[in-house]
Amino acid sequence: MKKNLLALFALSAFNFVSGQIMFTDHESGSFGMTNFNMRCMETYNGKIYIGGGDYNPDSAKVGVSADGATGTFSQDLSFSTISSGKDDQHVNVLKASAAGNFLFAATDIYADDSHVYRFDGSNWIDFGNIPYPFGDSSWYAGITAMETFTSTGSNDSIYIALSSSGNGNINGIGTCIFRTSVNNPGWVFVDSLGINDGSVNDFSVFNNQLFFCTDYNTRVFASATGTNFTAVSDTGLYAGSFLQEITCLEVFNAELYAGGSAGGQTFAEIWKTSDGLNWTQVGPTGINPGFDVDIIKDLKVSNNNLYVLGVEAMAAFQRNSQNASSSMFGNQTQIYSYDGTNYTQTDLNSISTSSDNGSWALLSYQNSLYAGGPNFAVTNHLYKGYFPPTASFNLSNDTTCLFSSITGYNTSTGYDSTEWFINTNIVSYIDTTPLGFYSTTGPDTVMLIVYNGPNSDTVSQIVFVGNQFSVDSINYISASVCATTPTNYSVFTSGGTSPFTYSWQYSGSSAGTQQTITLSPAASSTLSVSCTDHFGCTAFSSGFVNVLSSTDIVGTINYSSGQVANGNVYLIKQGASSALYDTVSVVSISAAPAGDFIFTGIPAGGYIIRAEANSGTYPLLVNTYYGDHYLWDSALTAIHGCSAADTNNIMMVELPVLTGPGSIHGTVYEGIGFGQKLILGPVGVMTNVIPGVPVKVGKNPGGAIVQTGLTDVNGQFDFMNLPYDNYKIYTDIPGYPMDSSYAVTLSAATDSLINLDYYVDSNSVYIDLTTAIHFVSKNTSSVRIYPNPSNGQIKIQTVELNNSKGLIRIFDVSGRLVFSSKENSFQSNSIITIDLDANEISSGTYFLEIPGTPEKYKIVVIKN
């Protein structure tokens, strides 16, 4: 179907700006080869290859650069060897395979057939005979185009277009398309053009199809399979415009561009398509307003732009060639960049001379655009266009210290060389480099200049340089310390700029990040600290910490008749708060030698030592603390070091011999926040009572101790056989002062007291809690109820009830019955247990009714 093609517009209608690419004369002459006219360029294995020759037999040549950057070329003699004797005139096309593993060279002929050669980086080989259809090979002028293409489900193939010398009019067949695998030669005839289509000028792969363009009929063909080609543009590309030849194809911004010539007219044309079918004109209609240009010789994408190589018409060339001084206005070859909107003429007067013959090509490689071809004055010209680089870098730090360095990381793009500066001094030419600051403090400028040929870009950043500073001292670093004893170490510096950061190391491990650290070393080692100020300046110091091993605490327990030979000694570690006083060790008093005790390997610190003689062997000895006191808050603190064993002897306090009818009973309960453990091992099932609490009864006034004991596993204490007198009840929990205590009187009227209960919270000991109502009760009943208060169970012990029967009932303070038991038979000294939890009795005050007794007994329930 004929396409609706609009008239092309002139490039002068676009917004032209000064081009940024800069061209230099890369190389001119014959490139180290005789009788060589350049026709094509390609990159392969990091080098530039050029192809050409002259119109003599066996003159086809390939030149190769020393590398991709230099302009020194030499003849590839191995190619000349393999092509010798085959009448090749020129290397018309060079093409690297899609995978980059091969380079192919295609030739035209002098009197025989054209050839394709393949190079694997080491050797050239003749890549097989081409099966010419319909007539002998002398009718075919040469290979004009070559491309690699992989159709769906097939392997990589190399395609060539072989043109005929008679306008393609050979037995009704024009230019022919052949293909073979890139790996193994085996040429297959694919398709041919009509007799009026002329030659194939270029191939291109677009939208997974292989396209090619022709000269005489200005048509474009495509195939998705690489076998059957159909015209996607008919003679409409010619009708209605001056376009007479499509010379080149290139893919840019996901569209296929086609450039062409207008024969003897003074403008060329460029077209594009996004689907391969519908084409629109994108100019130009006069590619250089300054003089005649009628051929778009090449299109090449480079540096995110489409570059257009335009050459002037032959008539204009003839005029310019008559004036070798190039004094006439205009040049032979012109290059434009196209960004999708605007054309920009690049380097108008520096790239070409009037002697260029117009058969030029473009090559994009390594941040550069190469333009080259034959020149009548100097044989060949090759120009290298350098794109402007973009400079950027990162620093490992933007502050540092005098006589220190940071690292610069070059993150620029499109460059080939680098220069680093500090202020005005060049310091490095490598991408990742140490940057040392050795002159003055204050702000310094780090500058990076990157080059791409004559183009350059610059970027800079301020780095603040601070002064060096030093560590004056680390306190206590040279002092010996006791094992596991907390010791504060502080570092002091001179100079530097705050804020500072610190990194402590002890025995190879991190020990802290503050100016002062607390260390409890178990073994001798090196303590070091690294200090860093605001600008990255650092100072370092270290010292050896001599750690002394833990030593023993020893002593002898004495009393008025000699040494105690049976009992225990408790070692209690003093703490910063009441809950941090803890029993850390309990040892037995030695029987031989009598009275001795030893605590082995005790860490340094302050301790309270309490001796408890066996009550069966020594019934009159009171639990006594070091310092010969019976209460902890009057005891002496045993200060234990690590230079030697410490000896701490105790003289036990002794009780008078007492007889009497009186008794005192009570329980010690945990309050809120109590955290100390007073005995080693399990404490029983009632976790809200405190076992192992020393309780003492003393005369009031005077305080002379008359009896002592420990609470049992249920937290209860009982004192019996007390004479009638006035007494005071003491609890003795190290670290817990008594905020209140019981002062009681035993007499004939009140010879037994119960419910003398204590509560211990996080700070002290109380005789009452706000969470319960507590009463001291005279024990006049024939019934004993305990524990009272209770946390879940109560026990009822009968004393004088014999064969009494009835129900046990519990009432709350409002008189509501909350519990009633089954009928019980009470015997003397029998014990009945009531589970309050099972009967869902909550915390509060209740009254207990027991048959056979006239009283109602008050009980208090306290639940945690």
Image (cartoon, rainbow, N blue to C red):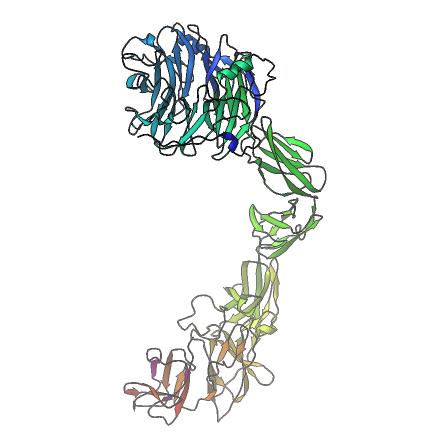
Where residue 115 appears, as percent x and y from the top left, is: 36, 12
Does 864 appear above or below 105?
below
Quarter of the image that includes the N terminus: top left
Is 225 inside the magenta-drawn segment?
no
Specify whether residue 182 is in view: no
**Quadrant of the image occupied by residue 80:** top left
Q: What residue sits 42% from the left and 13% below the top?
A: 91
Please name whichever residue, 336 or 407, is drawn nearer the observer in this view of the structure.
336
Where residue 854 appears, as percent x and y from the top left, is: 37, 94
Does 1 appear above or below 356?
below
Does 421 appear above or below 593?
above
Q: Which residues are magenta?
A: 826-854
The answer to whether residue 229 is left or right of residue 655 is: left
Does 345 appear above or below 779?
above
Is 849 inside the magenta-drawn segment?
yes
**Quadrant of the image occupied by residue 216:** top left
Farthest residue in the front direction? 240
Specify whether residue 218 is in view: yes
Where residue 717 appears, as percent x and y from the top left, is: 46, 79
Quarter of the image that includes the C terminus: bottom left
Q: What residue sits 34% from the left and 84% below the top?
A: 830
Where residue 495 appears, as percent x and y from the top left, is: 71, 48
Please name whichever residue, 322 or 614, is drawn nearer the observer in this view of the structure.
322
Please name whichever residue, 366 or 443, is drawn nearer the observer in this view of the structure.
366
The answer to whether residue 350 is left or right of residue 679 is: right
Please state the total of marks drawn on the protein image: 0
The answer to whether residue 28 is left or right of residue 423 is: left
Please name whichever residue, 444 or 486, is drawn nearer the observer in this view of the structure.
444
